[in-house]
Each structure stands twice: as C-alpha cells, then as structure tokens.
C-alpha cells in the first residue's frame, strides 16, 4: 500500500472479528507508534495489550467502574459495560506517561502519546487490519485506571480495538484543505 493511500483513506472500522493481528503485525504496528513526534525524547507513552480471556476480565472491570460511578446502574448497563472489550479480538490501551520536564509541558507529552496511538491505527490500516480508537467514560475512570495499574502520572489516551474488518470499509469523506487552512499575514 502506498503511503499516501494509507494516509488519505484510513477509516475507523467498528465491526471487527478474529483473527487478531499476528505477533509480527503487532511488532510492526508498535514500531510505527514509537516513531511519534517526541520533543525531548521522553517517550511519554506505553501500551497494554488485552486479548483472549483478559477481555472478559476488562469487561468485569468496566462493570465495576460503572457500578462505582452509578450504584443504581441497571443490569443492562452492567452487561453493556462487560461487552465493550468483546468488540474486537485485541485491544491496545494507549497510555500517556506524563513527566515533569522544564522544556516539555504535559500537554506536549499527551499529544505525543496521541500521535503514537494514531500511528498504531494508521499502521493497522496498512496491514489490512480494522481498527477503532475509542475513549469514553472508561478512559477517564479512576476504577479503570487502578485496575489497569496506571500510575498517578499516567492517563489513558484511548482504547484501540484491532481485528479483521467485517464487511466493506467505508470511503472517507474528502475534506477540502481550504476550509481549514488560512494565511496569516501579521
């Protein structure tokens, strides 16, 4: 696949099934992610992979977080939380590791981790994989953070769902740069 094809035509794909990316594919995906812009070479990111039965355990963690946030959560709401990690055969939790640095503010580090997650999603597309980057309430929930072992200086950038796309990939809407770019002349 040509680089510009990948950059211009990648779309999120929510319907994913087995097989998950192979170990070799994952290695390439993470190698791309690690090429994200990184002011100060802080490498302000890390990743967790969640597959197989661990997805069900993550679903239980999501249900615990749902119940902690809303003690009156319905059984349907808890079942929905449990089902979330089952949307794909592999989840990658993209995590920003924020560090005190005199020249690199936390916002730059958070953006760098986001670029790493973006690289992961782009690389998945070039491998013929389907991917969906999701956040939602679970990405910001303290119960989820604790259950995943995040340190106080870490933030979830997103849950990247990976697998084999089911159905046709949609074509992205073509956006016109002129609608987003202007010249500043001082």
Image (spheres, rainbow, N blue to C red):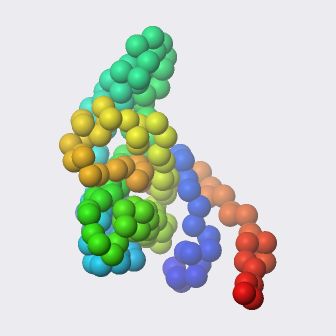
Q: Quadrant of residue 61?
A: top left
Name the residue rendered at 41%, 23% in the picture.
69
Name of the residue lying farthest toward the bottom: 185
Residue 106 location (% of width, % of height): 36, 62
Q: State left or right for residue 7 relative to residue 84.
A: right
Residue 134 location (% of width, % of height): 48, 48
Q: State left or right for residue 181 relative to residue 111.
A: right
Question: Observer-nearest residue: 124 or 110?
Answer: 110
The quadrant in which the C terminus is found is bottom right
Question: Observer-nearest residue: 62 or 113?
Answer: 113
Q: Quadrant of residue 24?
A: bottom left
Q: Is residue 47 above or below residue 73?
A: below
Q: State left or right for residue 55 relative to residue 87.
A: left
Q: Is residue 55 above or below residue 4?
A: above
Q: State left or right for residue 8 relative to residue 60.
A: right
Name the residue rendered at 34%, 72% in the picture.
104
Q: Is residue 80 above or below residue 94?
A: above
């Amino acid at each position: 696949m040509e680089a510009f094809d990948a950059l211009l035509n990648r779309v999120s794909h929510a319907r994913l099934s087995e097989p998950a990316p192979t170990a070799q594919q994952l290695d390439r995906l993470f190698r791309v992610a690690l090429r994200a812009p990184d002011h100060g070479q802080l490498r302000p990111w890390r990743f967790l992979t969640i597959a197989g039965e661990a997805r069900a355990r993550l679903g239980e963690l999501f249900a615990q977080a749902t119940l902690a946030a809303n003690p009156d959560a319905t059984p349907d709401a808890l079942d929905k939380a449990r089902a979330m990690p089952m949307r794909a055969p592999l989840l990658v939790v993209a995590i920003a590791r924020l560090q005190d640095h005199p020249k690199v503010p936390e916002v730059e580090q958070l953006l760098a981790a986001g670029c790493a997650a973006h690289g992961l999603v782009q690389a998945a597309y070039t491998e013929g994989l389907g991917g969906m980057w999701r956040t939602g309430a679970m990405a910001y929930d303290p119960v989820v953070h604790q259950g995943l072992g995040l340190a106080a200086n870490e933030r979830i950038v997103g849950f990247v769902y990976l697998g084999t796309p089911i159905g046709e990939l949609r074509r992205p809407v073509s956006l016109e740069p002129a609608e987003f770019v202007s010249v500043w002349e001082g």
